[in-house]
Amino acid sequence: MNNSQTNQPSFWKSDAALISLALMWGTSHVIQKDILKEHSPAFSTSLRFGIAALCFGLLFAGHLRRTSRREVIQGAVLGLCSFVGIGFYVSGLFFTQASKTGFISGLFIVFIPLLSFLVFRERPTRDHLTGLAIAIGGFALLSFPQSGELFNWGDILVLLAAVAWAALTAATSAFARESSVKTLAAVQVIVVAALSTVVWIVLSRIAHSAADPQSLPILVAMEAASNPLDLRFAVRIAYMAVVVTFIAALVQTWGLRKVSSTHAAILYALDPVTAAVFAYFVLGETLGWRRGVGAALIIAGVMVSRLKLASRLTRPGDGGSMELKSEIQPIEMDS
């Protein structure tokens, strides 16, 4: 296959779609953290996905009635991965900075080859392992106590969210090639909406029935929040529901149908960069030199893993570049 195929409209459309997805995710870290200042995690998540699920129901009702059982099961698997990721992420966001959250959650890009090995028995390459080692070093620097700030469990929770999202990416890439994009995206969002609503109802009842909610575990006590409904909250939750959930679910499923998850991971590296810039301008958060180096190491680990830089630097001649071409060519065929 010649390189002219990279100019096919569908190839560039899928790349543009996944880049826009990374930008959406980057802005969501700051907006979600702002929502959690006055609203509980389970309440905001159930409302966000509930609105998105309503959008799917209103716009694709006829299509969803023709859904096969296999597509429903696949969509439910995606929904479960997404729910676990959202649960860890929203909980972790309470205990860490939005800029740190963006970088740490970006580690899901490096976890994809490890999950591929565990699930599909595909052995990670030297580049994957090198990239992972560099990224873990970056994670340690990014989360290390700075200016009296102690290491918090929020960093670990967000890291677990990254693992769940890596599983979501791998599964979406596999399912979208054989099933309806609209169905997979819709069922995924509906499952998350249903699960998060159940969690909110249970936790809020426990919190409100307790004599002293503050004596409960913090993630349960949070559900005793008043959750005020005002214009500021409405605008933010509408953005999170319509743009970051409804549109993003369609974009991600469609994009991963066109390209491989490995190629998509390269584009997703824009997520943590956007999160840090957005947090800097909107919240006034700073990284400091140590976190700046840690963030740079995470991005470097991602690039080493995905662009096979370790192989290219250690092999004479054009072996490394030829290996890179062999990885990218199947992506062009999919598009």
Image: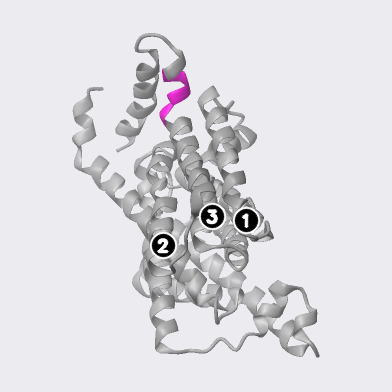
Q: Which residue is mark 3?
A: 78
Disc 1/disc 2 C-alpha distance (Å): 19 Å
Q: Is residue 155 toward the left or the right of residue 253 in the image?
A: right
- Mark sitting earlier along the chain (3/2): 3
Q: Which residue is mark 1?
A: 155
Q: Residue 145: horizontal and vertical position, in percent? A: 64, 54
Tell me what residue is drawn at x 18 percent, y 28 percent: 4
Magenta region: 307-312
Q: From the viewer's side, name the closer residue of 19 and 261.
A: 19
Tell me what residue is drawn at x 38 percent, y 53 percent: 22
Q: Which residue is mark 2?
A: 280
Disc 3/disc 2 C-alpha distance (Å): 32 Å
Q: Residue 161: horizontal and vertical position, in percent? A: 59, 55
Neighbourhood count class around disc 3 (C-alpha, 10 Å): few under 14, some 14–19, many 20 upward:
many
Tell me what residue is drawn at x 38 percent, y 48 percent: 270
> Residue type at mark 2?
Tyr
Q: Is residue 158 toward the left or the right of residue 230 in the image?
A: right
Magenta stretch: helix, strand or loop mostly: helix
Q: Name the residue furthest top.
A: 316
Badge 2 marks a residue whose secondary structure is helix
Question: Can residue 320 be seen from the camera position used here?
Answer: yes
